[in-house]
Image (cartoon, rainbow, N blue to C red):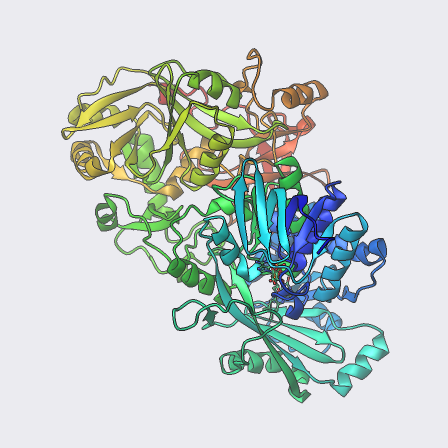
């Protein structure tokens, strides 16, 4: 024990692929005074039995980034650390059975190209030339990923561990973390071998992450599935083919049938994501064992029968092979299937890198991201998709189990833009949920809050099946159009429960807030949009700030940003200031359209002459409400903020007053259409840490005259250097589909930017895209092309003003 480290800068708990990669990347960043604790032998968790597939494919930009990085890292890792590994880059074919699937592939090809990868689409005949044993008669095509392959997960982990050790980091095996405690600014990590005093702790405990999180008082949103793959014996025909051509078959994924099939030596490895599937350790009669190191669940082949038969029909060669082994291991899931990488919510100097469902292909990228969080407090790529703060605490164990099973059972499903997954719904309901439901609202969850997406009219198809399309004109299209036109011509009301809201008070609040935001604070009685930048000048978040008093501010932000923004504010809060999360007590409706003044005049005592960006208290149906003179829809309008207890009667009164002028409820789809026409950005789409404020076209929200605000130096330097890409609004001559997030922009045969939003604008009658374009091209009138599912569509850069109501006259009316 004499050698046991008693201090370290960082302690990582968990020695799977992810923990080892985190240690490696911390050491690479120069943080070598780090210790990894593994309660058993390295790889004892999920890593030892993983199949080791290393795809780059993802329809998420950030996940693709991580996986691409991993594949690149793994190629050179063996040599870099002198630990040879079995890493076969075989390429893969991903089969498509439908037009929609090929559209998904084409979109990913576009994203991949932008990340420097050469993925491509194959016709059914070309697939056969890559994969001769394949039945292709019913295929629409395939995606070929030349970077895909498989790696030995244990060797990968050992290589990362070796590399980390070579740089000076330490690994303590057979040394569980049994507890943690905070002493002053330090953590003390308790183990049977002794205590380690450290600055920072990382939870990389895989499927034990919830247990480790409990040591920090955190209830971590996750569950555990059982996942199997089947190993088949040598097939002589495959052996002679493989020897003849000198390589393995590419990895095959039949995503519409939900399995992968990989050549393993001269046999096969078949791995299905079945539905129905099986959760483990989710009920009192199936408790999680204290230790499951290097263990497996009993085989359960019955539930895979369909997939085995389907795979044999697809690759008849498989029928010749004997099944030799089944691996059935635990695999952790968060409610959305993405891992947790980033700051541990509510806990200082603690981070998470856990709950990986694809932890082998993501370990490389995850280690990079985790190390950046720890050493720099921020990541190169926007990693909101994996940020622990995207879960806000409503995700109880049953919700986690149900969502985990839903994700697993649809692991390869296409994520359509208007589709809402049905499980785990109704967690948080608006006070007027019954009323909006009765009016035909079709709901979708936002941080658990059910909000109307659109209002179905009699006869509109509200089936889930009808949502599974990339096309713009789904069953909602006509209704959304009517909703938008009602907002344009008369008045609309959008019930918006769950806006996150924080009350900031205390002496010095104004000074402090001014240093947090890039722009000017509003004066008392007024409100404004405020942007928070990081040290690099990148966009962290956007909030509405209402100044209630000299030292009293109400900060309102997106529902999904609740925990993220709260943590950001609390992390920087000056001593003596108070920040209270008032989200639960209040609700909101957006009342907007040229007749909204008439509606409020008929039901409130408000002073309706007050201008844009003011607020006031008023009475509606006897209840005190706040009226904010703003509209994200870009028409005359007010946000009505009421206490939840009053919300229903306020709604009733407004609806009754609006009847005569044609007030109509509208939903989030309509709001999306209305806001893109105004060039209003959405958080974590258009506004993310992938862009600086200057790139985001937000300089009018930067007050250069302020002596100090976070990010000022970086923004000044960027301004001096010249901004390289700029936010633009484009009108697009798109076909049947709107450009999805991260569609590439082309100019003279080169990729010159990307879209961050795309939707049909019903007031302007055009497809509108928001995006980022090389600065020299960001000139009104420039013609570019947007690649929409593989098709290049003509697009024109608009004036640097809203497409609808360029001078904001309707807004200020
Ligand atoms: C059958 C199967 C096939 C799979 N195939 C693939 C695949 O092909 N590709 C892919 O990308 N992913 C695959 N996966 C998923 C992959 O296995 C996991 O995502 C990955 O191994 C997670 O790595 P990790 O480091 O996060 O967790 P783990 O490997 O589970 O490591 C966590 C470690 O923490 C240790 N630990 C826990 N508590 C403590 C404590 N208190 N103190 C100290 N140490 C502790 C554990 O012993 C464990 O070693 C598969 C999973 C299964 C079940």
Residue appearing at x 55%, y 81% in the figure: 299
| Quarter residue 326 falls in | bottom right
Note whether 92 is above or below 37 in the view shown: below
Can see residue 788?
Answer: no
Q: Quadrant of residue 628?
A: top left
In the visual, does 804 lie left or right of 105?
A: left
| Quarter, ligand 1 | bottom right
Q: Quadrant of the C terminus?
A: top left
Q: Residue at 48% x, 45% y: name it.
A: 390
Residue 725: percent from left, percent from top: 66, 30
Q: Can you say whether 135 is above or below 407 in the image?
A: below
Where does the N terminus fall, quadrant-wise?
bottom right
Horizontal side, residue 48 vs residue 738: left or right: right
Q: Nearer the viewer, residue 525 or 552?
A: 552
Q: Is residue 603 left or right of residue 64?
A: left
Residue 633 percent across, percent down from the top left: 38, 32
Residue 406: give x, y in percent of width and height: 45, 63
Position above or below: 418 against 606: below
Q: Decide which of 810, 72 is in the foreground and name it.
A: 72
Report whether residue 234 is seen.
yes
- Is residue 424 toward the left or the right of residue 204 in the image? left
Q: Position of residue 325 (x, y in %)?
A: 64, 82
Q: Relative to residue 227, is residue 761 depicted above or below? A: above
Which residue is drawn at the image coordinates 43% and 34% (left, top)? 675
């Amino acid at each position: 024990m004499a050698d046991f480290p008693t201090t370290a800068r960082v302690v990582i708990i968990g020695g799977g692929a992810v923990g080892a990669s985190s240690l490696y990347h911390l050491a690479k960043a120069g943080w070598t005074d780090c210790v990894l604790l593994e309660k058993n032998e390295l790889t004892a968790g999920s890593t030892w039995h993983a199949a080791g597939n290393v795809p780059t494919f993802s329809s998420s930009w950030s996940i693709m980034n991580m996986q691409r990085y991993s594949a690149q890292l793994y190629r050179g890792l063996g040599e870099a650390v002198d630990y040879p590994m079995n890493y076969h880059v075989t390429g893969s074919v991903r089969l498509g059975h439908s037009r929609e699937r090929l559209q998904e592939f084409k979109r990913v090809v576009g994203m991949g190209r932008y990340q420097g990868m050469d993925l491509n689409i194959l016709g059914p005949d070309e697939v056969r030339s890559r994969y001769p044993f394949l039945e292709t008669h019913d295929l629409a095509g395939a995606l070929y990923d030349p970077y895909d392959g498989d790696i030995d997960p244990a060797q990968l982990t050992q290589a990362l561990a070796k590399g980390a050790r070579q740089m000076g980091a330490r690994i303590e095996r057979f040394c569980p973390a049994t507890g943690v405690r905070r002493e002053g600014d330090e953590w003390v990590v308790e183990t049977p071998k002794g205590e380690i005093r450290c600055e920072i702790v990382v939870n990389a405990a895989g499927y034990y992450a919830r247990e480790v999180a409990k040591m920090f008082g955190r209830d971590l949103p996750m569950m555990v599935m059982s996942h199997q793959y089947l190993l088949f014996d040598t097939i002589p025909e495959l052996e002679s083919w493989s020897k003849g051509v000198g390589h393995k078959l590419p990895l095959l994924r039949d995503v519409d049938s939900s399995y992968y099939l990989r050549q393993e030596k001269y046999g096969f490895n078949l791995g299905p994501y079945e539905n129905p599937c099986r959760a483990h350790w989710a009920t009192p009669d199936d408790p999680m064992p204290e230790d499951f190191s290097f263990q497996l669940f009993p085989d359960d082949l019955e539930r895979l029968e369909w997939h085995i038969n389907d795979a044999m029909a697809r690759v008849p060669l498989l029928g010749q092979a004997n099944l030799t082994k089944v691996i059935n291991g635990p695999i952790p899931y968060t409610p959305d299937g993405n891992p947790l990488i980033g700051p541990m919510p509510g806990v200082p100097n603690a981070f998470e890198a856990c709950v990986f469902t694809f932890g082998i292909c993501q370990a490389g990228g995850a280690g990079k991201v985790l190390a950046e969080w720890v050493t720099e407090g921020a990541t190169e790529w926007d990693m909101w998709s994996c940020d622990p703060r995207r879960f806000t605490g409503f995700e109880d164990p049953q919700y986690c189990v149900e969502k985990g099973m839903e994700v697993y059972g649809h692991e390869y499903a296409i994520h359509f833009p208007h589709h809402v997954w049905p499980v785990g719904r109704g967690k948080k309901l608006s006070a007027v949920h019954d009323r909006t439901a009765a009016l035909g609202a079709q709901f979708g969850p936002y941080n658990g809050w059910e909000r109307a997406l659109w209002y179905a009219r009699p006869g509109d198809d509200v089936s889930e099946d009808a949502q599974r399309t990339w096309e713009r004109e789904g069953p909602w299209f006509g209704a959304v159009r009517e909703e938008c036109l009602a907002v344009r011509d008369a008045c609309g009301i959008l019930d918006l429960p769950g806006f996150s809201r924080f009350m900031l008070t205390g002496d010095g609040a104004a000074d402090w807030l001014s240093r947090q935001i890039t722009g000017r604070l509003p004066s008392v009685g007024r409100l404004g949009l405020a942007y928070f930048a990081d040290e690099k000048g990148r966009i962290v978040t956007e909030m509405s700030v209402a100044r209630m008093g000299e030292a009293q501010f109400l900060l309102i932000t997106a529902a999904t940003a609740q925990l993220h923004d709260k943590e950001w504010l609390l992390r920087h809060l000056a001593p003596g200031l108070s920040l209270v999360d008032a989200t639960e007590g209040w609700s909101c409706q957006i009342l907007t359209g040229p007749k909204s003044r008439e509606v409020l005049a008929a039901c409130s005592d408000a002073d309706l002459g007050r201008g844009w960006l003011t607020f006031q208290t008023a009475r509606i149906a006897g209840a005190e409400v706040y009226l904010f003179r703003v509209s994200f829809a870009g028409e005359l309008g007010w946000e009505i903020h009421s206490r939840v207890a009053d919300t229903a009667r306020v709604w009733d009164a407004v609806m009754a007053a609006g009847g005569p002028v044609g007030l109509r409820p509208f939903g989030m789809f309509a709001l999306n259409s209305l806001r893109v026409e105004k060039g209003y950005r959405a958080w974590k789409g258009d506004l993310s840490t992938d862009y600086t404020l200057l790139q985001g076209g937000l300089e009018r929200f930067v007050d250069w005259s302020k002596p100090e605000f976070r990010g000022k130096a970086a923004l000044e330097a960027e301004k001096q250097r010249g901004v390289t890409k700029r936010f633009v609004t484009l009108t697009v001559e798109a076909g049947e589909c709107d450009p999805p997030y991260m569609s590439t922009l082309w100019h003279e045969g080169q990729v010159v930017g990307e879209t961050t939003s795309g939707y049909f604008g019903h007031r302007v009658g055009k497809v509108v895209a928001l995006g980022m374009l090389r600065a020299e091209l960001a000139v009104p009138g420039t013609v570019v092309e947007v690649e929409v599912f593989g098709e290049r569509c003509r697009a024109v850069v608009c004036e640097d003003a809203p497409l609808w109501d360029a001078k904001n006259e309707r807004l200020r009316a």
